[in-house]
Amino acid sequence: MANGMSVNRIVKLFNDNPPMTINDVRKLGVSARLIGCGLYRRTYKIKNSPWVIKIPHDETNIPHGMAEYDAVQTCLRSRADKAAAIRPYLPSIEYFNDNSGISIMEYIVPLDKTKTPKRIQDGIVNMMEDLIESLWPIKFDEHYDKDLHRGNMGINKYGYFKLLDLGYFLPDGQC
């Protein structure tokens, strides 16, 4: 619970008054601190909760968050065997706004921020790359990077392995 608010309460606040910036989030009474900054978004940990808010750097970065959200939702709804194979590794996304690109999702500690030895982290990354490449025979090259690395995979509060960023390696949200 963030400041005594459940994620459902925060989602309701966001639906009623969609924030566009972290200042808007804070004006709604949600306390959050910056914990990471990626190529497209900043990640804020909601105080006293297992949730984070991802906010695009600017409006040109909204499509990346949308691609991630669409890919996760497509895999969750798909009845395809390949979707079933990846479903346990998908993050829980509780909120996404198409206009702002802001999302609320479960907090996942990136592998590169854990005490797991680097060789074990690399083994996990290689295993996930093999799984992804066997399910989606996409030609990854200098123009299309699957973006699978220690920073985009991690462990949730229950100790389960999760993918942090699904938008890159599923073209057009295919699952």
Image (tube, helix red, strand yellow):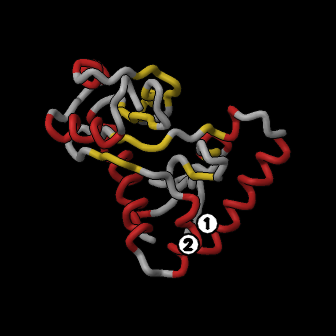
Where in the figure is residue 145, as x and y percent of width and height?
Answer: 56, 53
Give the crowd class for mark 2: few <14, some 14-19, many >=20 residues within 10 Å.
some
Q: Is residue 112 left or right of residue 1?
A: right
Residue depicted at 75% across the width and 54% down the height: 124
Of 1 and 46, which appears nearest the observer? 1
Where in the figure is residue 79, as x and y percent of width and height?
Answer: 44, 80
Vertical comparison of 22 with 112: above or below = above
- Structural distance between the alpha carbons of marks 1 and 2: 6 Å
Vertical comparison of 146 with 78: above or below = above
Give the crowd class for mark 1: few <14, some 14-19, many >=20 residues within 10 Å.
some
Where in the figure is residue 94, as x and y percent of width and height?
Answer: 36, 48
Do the numbered discs 1 and 2 sit on residues whose CB atoms are within 8 Å? yes
Residue 59: image quadrant is top left
Residue sitting at the far front: 4
In the picture of the structure, the residue carrying the numbered disc 2 is: 136
Q: Is residue 40 left or right of residue 25?
A: right
Of 97 and 155, which appears nearest the observer? 155
Residue depicted at 67% across the width and 60% down the height: 129
Residue depicted at 30% across the width and 46% down the height: 96
Give, as a three-letter code, the residue at label 2: Trp
Where in the figure is residue 100, as x and y percent of width and height?
Answer: 24, 37
Vertical comparison of 72 with 1: above or below = below
Give, as a three-letter code, the residue at label 1: Ile
In the picture of the structure, the residue carrying the numbered disc 1 is: 132
At numbered mark 1, what does the secondary structure look like: helix, strand or loop? helix
Residue 25: image quadrant is top left
Residue depicted at 45% across the width and 53% down the height: 167
Vertical comparison of 5 with 81: above or below = above
